[in-house]
Amino acid sequence: GMIVGILLAFIALWLLGNFDIVTLPADVYGTSKLPLDLSVMDFTLTVIGALIIIALSSFYPAKKATQINVLDTLRNE
């Protein structure tokens, strides 16, 4: 899941860097090409942040699921 997202992000970054998909008005910004610069630190912090969000968002439902007595739930249905 996450590896596919990282690969898609690199493909999008390559496409935006090599083809003029997004053009800017040169008289306003001084350049007509979208400036793209991905540092290793930005990439690493983004991946770590996503992993933290994923871990936190899956912890609460998993904790609630462990507190449910499955046999009582099945008997009452």
Image (tube, rainbow, N blue to C red):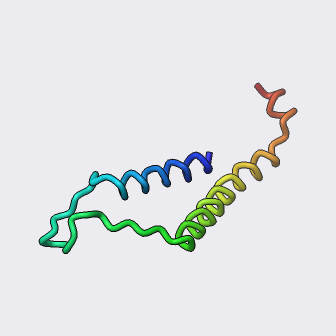
> Which residue appears at 21% of the width and 65% of the height?
32
Number of numbered discs overlaid on the protein picture: 0
Q: Position of residue 26 (x, y in %)?
A: 16, 68
User: Residue at the location (62% across, 45% down)?
Assistant: 1
Relative side of 20 to 77, left or right: left
At which x and y percent is residue 60? 70, 55
- Where residue 57 appears, as percent x and y from the top left, is 64, 55
**Percent position (x, y) of residue 35?**
33, 68
Left or right: 76 as drawn, with respect to 50: right
Depicted 16 relative to depicted 41: above or below? above
Q: Which image quarter: residue 20? A: bottom left
Residue located farthest toward the left when viewing the structure as drawn: 27
Foreground of the two, 48 or 59: 48
Residue shown at the point (60%, 68%) measured from the top left = 44
**Side of 33 where 27 appears, left or right:** left
In the image, taking residue 11 as reference, residue 54 lies left or right, namely right
Q: Residue 52 or 45: which is nearer the viewer?
A: 45
Which image quarter holds the C terminus?
Answer: top right
